[in-house]
Image (cartoon, helix red, strand yellow):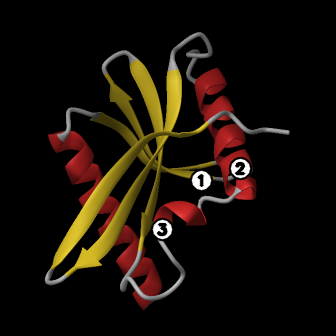
Amino acid sequence: MLNKSQKFGRASEALAADILRRSGYRILARNYRTKMGEIDIIARDGETIVFVEVKARRDRGHYGHPKYAVTRAKQQKISKTALYYLKGTGQMGCSARFDVVTLTPCGDDVRCEIVRNAFELAYG
């Protein structure tokens, strides 16, 4: 059974996937897990494979903007997991990038930002 935080995370990832679809991305996988880490969403944007980290906040006052929560350590975990995915699917020669989708409350609505090329491959 999921706790309140996990339910919020799942709902945020579902919303982000829907927004990405409407922006022209084709979703390939969600919650891709390996022993190295997890990638929230793997998608295709044209010919590019995109590894997407979703960051959401329940309120604007705490913890700052969600895009700053993707730390160097998190980037390294995502990068290693992405390389594992590319190797495992025979796509090492494909163009790839790392995006971050942020979701923040804005009145009664949610503001979404897609940060393309949010960071470079970070594995060392």
Amino acid under disc 3: Pro
Q: Which residue is mark 1?
A: 38
Q: How far across and down, in percent of the image, does residue 20 sit? A: 26, 44
Instruction: Work out how far the residue at label 1 is from the one at label 3, CA to CA, in angstroms.
Output: 18 Å
Instruction: Work out how far the residue at label 1 is from the one at label 2, CA to CA, in angstroms.
Output: 8 Å
| Residue 106 position by quadrant | bottom left
Q: Which residue is mark 3?
A: 66
Q: How far across and down, in percent of the image, does residue 14 sit? A: 28, 60
Tell me which label, 1 or 2, sits earlier in the chain: 1
Q: Are marks 1 and 2 in contact (CB under 8 Å)?
A: yes
User: Relative to the observer, which residue lies in front, 86 or 55?
Assistant: 55
Crowd tier of the residue under label 2, counting other residues whose Cα lies within 10 Å: few below 14, some 14–19, many 20 or above: some
Crowd tier of the residue under label 3, counting other residues whose Cα lies within 10 Å: few below 14, some 14–19, many 20 or above: some
Task: Name the residue located 34 percent from the left edge and 48 percent from the top edge.
Answer: 114
Q: Which residue is mark 2?
A: 77
Task: Name the residue located 21 percent from the left edge and 52 percent from the top edge.
Answer: 18
| Residue 24 position by quadrant | top left
Tell me which label, 3 or 2, sits earlier in the chain: 3
Task: Name the residue located 45 percent from the left edge and 84 percent from the top edge.
Answer: 5
